Image (tube, rainbow, N blue to C red):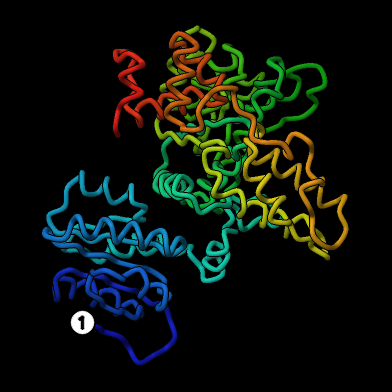
Amino acid sequence: MQATHESTHGPRALLFTSRGGTSRDVVSLLERRGIRVTERPLEAGAERFAACLRPDVILIEPSELSRGNWQQLTREMVCAQRTVPVILLAAGGSEELAVAALRLGVRDYLALPVSAGALDEALERCQGQSAAEARRAEAGLETAHDTHAGRDAMVGASEALCNIRSAMLRTAASDCTVLITGETGTGKELAAEFIHEHSPRRNKPFVCVNCAAIPDPLLESELFGHTRGAFTGADSLRDGLLASAEGGTVLLDEIGDMSLSAQAKILRVLEKKEVSRLGGTQQKKIDVRFVAATNQDLESLASRGTFRRDLYYRLNVARVELPPLRERREDIPLLVEYYRRRLGGGDVAEISEECLRRISQYDWPGNIRELKNVLESILLQSGPGEIGADALPEAVRGMPRREPGIPLDERERLVEALCATQWNKSRAAEKLRWSRMTLYRKMAKYRISRLLPPRMMRGWEL
């Protein structure tokens, strides 16, 4: 069944349904808002039809009999139409169904029958997907902070990055504290900006506080402000960084490097949402959302007593773990193309296939930051024409750096590293150049337990 309007202008919704006629109320609500609706059966090839129609929003209504089918089709739809928001409509839905849908990359989940208010809220959350942004993302050039020209981008089309984007969009809709973890150079500040730009606070300030760069004696003055005469040189009243972010988002970057005394002050702000200027007595309420970022394992630091456990629990409400670049190599060509165009100037040099192959093979211990620096260097040194592999630094030109004797299979590498370090997970993670959280995630993925001897683990069939 297909229902469309004669007009060729205005937003368009594509509705896939397993049962004809069950979503008539939704169709009416959409049409009353000036949205043209095209209805199609939920069947094989649905994602190809979506690509031809180029809708502004996709709605999927599965039936009880088609749950396995709709999950596969939804996964294909989300991958094929990365910038088009997908909304799931489900009768008699459950929390399990909602979680499954969100993990597939579905933007929103509405229970049938849908109220006008709930539909309006869902459409408003999806409003940010413009046609220009869609075209950029299809080329792998979607930006996380599009309103600021010259900013770096969260570029990639891998399943890992798609899942992270979906998780960050869900997190952005709430106002909870977020902890972003990942190795140096994985884009933690960009992730924080992405969350801010997709949150209700997007029109308010985004303030980044480098916790490692502020000495303890200056911390209170910098964060909370000071009164006149609070210390030598304080000749005027001054608001701190937290007050300057009123209504917006504060990123506490490198929070793992903050001293224990500074952690206590931050904990109070997180709990009370109020600050007092240095030298003052009045408490002032602030309305900010806190996002923290670190390349350290805060749980491990807390167990050693160098990070407050209560602060860790306060920060770890919503968690975003950014994978290192070597775990999403399929995004490297897209990143290369993005930086080639951005950094290449007027006459953008081409990257040869051999050069791109060497770049894709390298492990990038400095992650995206290192990749960007290398590309900027070779683009500056190269003239018009094609850039060959000989332009790359020697470390990148060589084969990927791997531990000698470790098999290429990821699961085997993990088992060998654990055995070689007598199951010391910190040393195993360091040996593999992973974070501890990545190591735990891989152990869970491959069902690796110390209770099983290595010879049994080698023989597992997953």
Is 433 left, or right, of 15 in this rendering? Answer: right
**Quadrant of the rendering where the N terminus is positioned:** bottom left
Side of 225 relative to 394 (left or right): left
Total number of numbered labels?
A: 1
At horizontal 23% and vertical 77% (from top left) the residue drawn is 28
Which residue lies most toward the bottom here? 6
Quadrant of the drawing holding the C terminus: top left
**In the depicted view, which residue is nearer to us: 392 or 158?**
392
- Place residue 64 in its image quadrant: bottom left
In the displayed structure, 303 sits above or below 407; it is above
Horizontal placement of 406 versus 68: left or right?
A: right
Q: Residue at x 23, y 60 (%)?
A: 70
Which of the pair 313/337 is nearer the observer? 337
Q: Residue at x 63, y 24 (%)?
A: 277
State the image coordinates of residue 88 (x, y, percent, origin top left). 27, 59
Question: Looking at the image, which is closer to me, 332 or 290?
Answer: 332
Specify few, some or many for label 1: CA neighbours under 10 Å numbering under 14, 14-19, or 20 or more.
few
Residue 393 percent coordinates (x, y): 79, 39
Q: Is residue 422 above or below residue 399?
A: above
Q: Which residue is mark 1?
A: 1
Residue 202 visible within the image: yes
Picture coordinates of residue 264, whole percent (x, y): 53, 15
Identify residue type, mark 1: Met
Query: Can the viewer see residue 271 in this picture?
Result: no
